[in-house]
Amino acid sequence: MSTPFNDARWDTFGLLKEAYLALDERIAAVSSSTAAVDRFVVDLLIRVARSPDATARPTDLARGLSMAPSHITRCLDEAESRKFITRKANPDDRRSTLIVLAPAGKRLLAKLEAPMTVVRDELIHGLLKPAEIERLERTLRTLRDHAQQHPERGDVP
Protein backbone atom coordinates (compact mmCIF):
# COMPACT_ATOMS: atom_id res chain seq x y z
CA MET A 1 0.00 0.00 0.00
CA SER A 2 1.41 3.42 -0.97
CA THR A 3 1.80 6.27 1.50
CA PRO A 4 -1.08 8.78 1.27
CA PHE A 5 -0.21 12.18 -0.23
CA ASN A 6 3.11 10.84 -1.53
CA ASP A 7 2.52 12.33 -5.01
CA ALA A 8 5.03 15.19 -5.52
CA ARG A 9 2.24 17.42 -6.92
CA TRP A 10 0.97 17.76 -3.33
CA ASP A 11 4.08 19.85 -2.66
CA THR A 12 2.63 22.65 -4.82
CA PHE A 13 -0.63 22.59 -2.91
CA GLY A 14 1.14 22.37 0.44
CA LEU A 15 3.55 25.19 -0.36
CA LEU A 16 0.71 27.46 -1.48
CA LYS A 17 -1.26 26.77 1.68
CA GLU A 18 1.79 27.10 3.96
CA ALA A 19 2.81 30.40 2.31
CA TYR A 20 -0.71 31.78 2.71
CA LEU A 21 -0.94 30.69 6.36
CA ALA A 22 2.49 32.15 7.20
CA LEU A 23 1.64 35.46 5.52
CA ASP A 24 -1.78 35.55 7.18
CA GLU A 25 -0.24 34.85 10.61
CA ARG A 26 2.24 37.71 10.23
CA ILE A 27 -0.48 40.16 9.14
CA ALA A 28 -2.76 38.99 11.99
CA ALA A 29 0.05 39.51 14.51
CA VAL A 30 0.61 43.05 13.27
CA SER A 31 -3.08 43.91 13.26
CA SER A 32 -3.68 42.48 16.74
CA SER A 33 -0.69 44.38 18.18
CA THR A 34 -1.94 47.61 16.59
CA ALA A 35 -5.67 47.43 17.35
CA ALA A 36 -7.87 45.30 19.60
CA VAL A 37 -10.03 44.01 16.77
CA ASP A 38 -10.75 40.44 15.70
CA ARG A 39 -8.54 39.47 12.75
CA PHE A 40 -11.53 38.34 10.71
CA VAL A 41 -13.15 41.75 11.17
CA VAL A 42 -9.92 43.37 9.95
CA ASP A 43 -9.95 41.07 6.90
CA LEU A 44 -13.56 42.05 6.29
CA LEU A 45 -12.80 45.77 6.51
CA ILE A 46 -9.84 45.47 4.15
CA ARG A 47 -12.01 43.57 1.66
CA VAL A 48 -14.75 46.23 1.84
CA ALA A 49 -12.13 48.99 1.44
CA ARG A 50 -10.79 47.24 -1.69
CA SER A 51 -14.29 47.10 -3.21
CA PRO A 52 -15.57 49.82 -5.57
CA ASP A 53 -16.78 52.81 -3.54
CA ALA A 54 -15.83 50.91 -0.35
CA THR A 55 -19.17 49.11 -0.69
CA ALA A 56 -19.84 45.38 -1.08
CA ARG A 57 -22.58 42.79 -0.90
CA PRO A 58 -22.37 40.33 2.01
CA THR A 59 -22.37 37.38 -0.40
CA ASP A 60 -19.37 38.82 -2.27
CA LEU A 61 -17.56 39.37 1.04
CA ALA A 62 -18.28 35.82 2.16
CA ARG A 63 -17.00 34.41 -1.14
CA GLY A 64 -13.92 36.69 -1.21
CA LEU A 65 -13.02 35.82 2.36
CA SER A 66 -14.04 32.14 2.15
CA MET A 67 -16.35 32.55 5.13
CA ALA A 68 -19.47 30.55 5.88
CA PRO A 69 -22.67 32.63 5.94
CA SER A 70 -22.92 32.35 9.74
CA HIS A 71 -19.32 33.53 10.18
CA ILE A 72 -19.69 36.49 7.81
CA THR A 73 -22.88 37.48 9.66
CA ARG A 74 -21.05 37.44 13.02
CA CYS A 75 -18.19 39.52 11.58
CA LEU A 76 -20.62 41.99 10.03
CA ASP A 77 -22.55 42.25 13.30
CA GLU A 78 -19.35 42.93 15.25
CA ALA A 79 -18.09 45.45 12.68
CA GLU A 80 -21.45 47.22 12.71
CA SER A 81 -21.66 47.28 16.52
CA ARG A 82 -18.21 48.93 16.56
CA LYS A 83 -19.39 51.39 13.88
CA PHE A 84 -16.76 50.21 11.37
CA ILE A 85 -19.40 49.53 8.71
CA THR A 86 -22.98 50.44 7.97
CA ARG A 87 -25.61 48.40 6.20
CA LYS A 88 -27.82 50.03 3.62
CA ALA A 89 -30.47 48.82 1.21
CA ASN A 90 -29.17 47.92 -2.22
CA PRO A 91 -30.77 50.42 -4.63
CA ASP A 92 -30.48 47.86 -7.47
CA ASP A 93 -32.12 45.04 -5.49
CA ARG A 94 -34.20 46.04 -2.48
CA ARG A 95 -34.12 42.46 -1.19
CA SER A 96 -30.39 42.71 -0.52
CA THR A 97 -28.10 44.79 1.64
CA LEU A 98 -24.87 46.61 0.91
CA ILE A 99 -22.00 46.92 3.37
CA VAL A 100 -20.35 50.35 3.44
CA LEU A 101 -17.09 51.23 5.14
CA ALA A 102 -17.92 53.82 7.82
CA PRO A 103 -15.64 56.62 9.06
CA ALA A 104 -14.56 54.59 12.12
CA GLY A 105 -13.62 51.70 9.81
CA LYS A 106 -11.59 54.07 7.63
CA ARG A 107 -9.79 55.39 10.72
CA LEU A 108 -8.99 51.87 11.90
CA LEU A 109 -7.64 50.89 8.48
CA ALA A 110 -5.57 54.09 8.33
CA LYS A 111 -4.04 53.12 11.68
CA LEU A 112 -3.32 49.57 10.44
CA GLU A 113 -2.03 50.43 6.97
CA ALA A 114 1.53 51.53 7.84
CA PRO A 115 2.47 48.54 10.02
CA MET A 116 0.78 46.11 7.64
CA THR A 117 2.58 47.71 4.70
CA VAL A 118 5.91 46.89 6.33
CA VAL A 119 4.94 43.20 6.46
CA ARG A 120 3.47 43.23 2.93
CA ASP A 121 6.64 44.76 1.53
CA GLU A 122 8.96 42.52 3.54
CA LEU A 123 7.18 39.33 2.52
CA ILE A 124 6.01 40.11 -1.01
CA HIS A 125 6.86 43.40 -2.74
CA GLY A 126 10.32 43.80 -1.23
CA LEU A 127 11.17 40.16 -1.88
CA LEU A 128 9.87 39.55 -5.41
CA LYS A 129 10.69 41.41 -8.61
CA PRO A 130 7.87 43.27 -10.41
CA ALA A 131 7.64 40.60 -13.13
CA GLU A 132 7.40 37.88 -10.44
CA ILE A 133 4.63 39.77 -8.67
CA GLU A 134 2.74 40.20 -11.94
CA ARG A 135 3.05 36.47 -12.69
CA LEU A 136 2.06 35.58 -9.11
CA GLU A 137 -1.03 37.82 -9.25
CA ARG A 138 -2.11 36.29 -12.58
CA THR A 139 -1.69 32.79 -11.18
CA LEU A 140 -3.50 33.60 -7.94
CA ARG A 141 -6.42 35.19 -9.82
CA THR A 142 -6.71 32.09 -12.01
CA LEU A 143 -6.72 29.79 -8.97
CA ARG A 144 -9.16 31.99 -7.02
CA ASP A 145 -11.58 32.48 -9.90
CA HIS A 146 -11.69 28.79 -10.73
CA ALA A 147 -12.16 27.75 -7.10
CA GLN A 148 -14.90 30.35 -6.55
CA GLN A 149 -16.75 29.21 -9.67
CA HIS A 150 -16.82 25.62 -8.45
CA PRO A 151 -17.44 25.68 -4.67
CA GLU A 152 -19.71 22.62 -4.91
CA ARG A 153 -16.81 20.43 -5.98
CA GLY A 154 -15.68 19.94 -2.40
CA ASP A 155 -17.18 16.44 -2.40
CA VAL A 156 -15.49 15.28 -5.63
CA PRO A 157 -12.69 12.77 -5.06
Image (cartoon, helix red, strand yellow):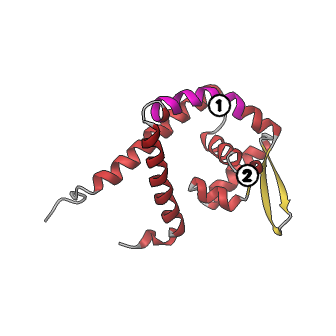
Q: Is residue 104 above or below residue 18?
A: above
The amino acid beneath tag 2 is Pro
Tell which residue pokes out farthest to the front in this image: 131
Q: Position of residue 119 (x, y in %)?
A: 52, 30
Left or right: where 2 falls relative to 38 = left
Asked whether residue 117 is drawn in magenta, I would say: yes
Q: Which residue is rendered at x = 18% and y = 59% of the image?
A: 3
Report which quarter residue 71 is drawn in.
bottom right
Q: Which residue is rendered at x = 73% and y = 59% of the image?
A: 57
Q: Position of residue 29 (x, y in %)?
A: 53, 31
Report which quarter residue 82 is drawn in.
top right
- The kind of secondary structure element at disc 1 is helix
Badge 2: few (under 14), some or many (20 or more) residues near its Cα, within 10 Å?
few
State the residue position of label 2: 52
Left or right: where 143 falls relative to 99 = left
Q: Position of residue 7 (x, y in %)?
A: 22, 59
User: Mark 1 or mark 2, which is nearer the start of the sequence?
Assistant: 2
Q: Magenta stretch: give its range.
A: 109-124
Q: Which residue is rendered at x = 34% and y = 47% of the image?
A: 15
Q: Is residue 98 above or below residue 34?
A: below
State the residue position of label 1: 113
> How many numbered discs?
2
User: Looking at the rendering, in which quadrant would you find the C terminus?
Assistant: bottom left
Q: How many angstroms separate mark 2 from mark 1 (CA)?
A: 18 Å
The amino acid beneath tag 1 is Glu
Left or right: where 2 falls relative to 21 = left
User: Looking at the rendering, in which quadrant would you find the N terminus?
Assistant: bottom left
Left or right: where 58 falls relative to 43 = right
Badge 1: few (under 14), some or many (20 or more) residues near its Cα, within 10 Å?
some
Asked whether residue 103 is drawn in magenta, I would say: no
- The kind of secondary structure element at disc 2 is helix
- The kind of secondary structure the magenta stretch mainly shows is helix
